[in-house]
Amino acid sequence: MSRYRPRETPGSRFITPEGHARLRAELEQLWRVERPQVTQAVSEAAAQGDRSENAEYTYGKRRLREIDRRVRFLRQRLEGMVVVDRPPSDRARIFFGAWVTLEADDARELRVRIVGPDEFDAAPGYISMDAPLARALLGKCVDDEVVVHAPEGKRTYAILVIEYPS
């Protein structure tokens, strides 16, 4: 068995202005604040002598690798992002960035916002545009019914409201 793993295809390249600002702030925090602090701690630990049994040095180097990996990922990801800062011309249909209120087949209401894959964990109700529910919703109008095939079975939703942030 080989160790080769095919590269994961990155998610969609769209992002909201809020999500872009959050990723940019994380990059700045890691690069300008955390990395210099960890570098200083590692150099102080290295000055103490024997590095083979120096836990501060070992864990500091590991943390530096984690920071560098995340910084590299954020820089590559932010480089190709498309910031969607204007609502679509047809606000009657569901597109990226829309807040959608749905009624499930069991009469429960659900309110979701369709965002990019890099920001769906930022707030409750955010779903990635690559998720099955979001893919089923894209392009639909109010009063349309959507059927989503989920692992727990088939779910039907009725679209009640479509809103776009201003």
Image: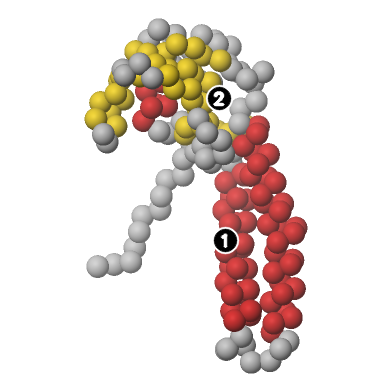
13 or 159, which is in the foreground?
A: 159
Label 1 Cα neighbours within 10 Å, binned few <14 / some 14-19 / many ≥20: few
Dot in front, 1 or 2: 2
Element under disc 1: helix
Q: Residue at x 27, y 36 (%)?
A: 151
Q: How far apart are marks 1 and 2 (CA)?
A: 29 Å
User: Callout 2, which amino acid?
Assistant: Gly
123 or 25, which is in the foreground?
A: 123
Task: Give the quadrant of residue 102.
Answer: top left
Q: Residue at x 59, y 81 (%)?
A: 55
75 or 44, which is in the foreground?
A: 44
Name the spot of residue 100 as percent of width and height, x first: 49, 19
Q: Which residue is drawn at 69% across and 82% down?
A: 45
Q: Which residue is drawn at 40% across and 7% down?
A: 143
Element under disc 2: loop
Task: Give the quadrant of residue 47.
Answer: bottom right
Tell me the quarter of the image containing the N terminus. bottom left
> Position of 145 compared to 43: left or right?
left
Label 2 Cα neighbours within 10 Å, binned few <14 / some 14-19 / many ≥20: many
Circle 1 is placed at which residue position? 69
The answer to whether residue 102 shows anywhere in this view is yes
Tell me the quarter of the image containing the C terminus. top right
The answer to whether residue 146 shows anywhere in this view is no
Nearer-N-terminus badge (1/2): 1
How many numbered marks are there?
A: 2
Colouring scheme applied when the structure was drawn: secondary structure
User: Callout 1, which amino acid?
Assistant: Arg
Q: Which mark is residue 82?
A: none
Name the spot of residue 98 as percent of width and height, x first: 54, 21
Circle 2 is placed at which residue position? 97
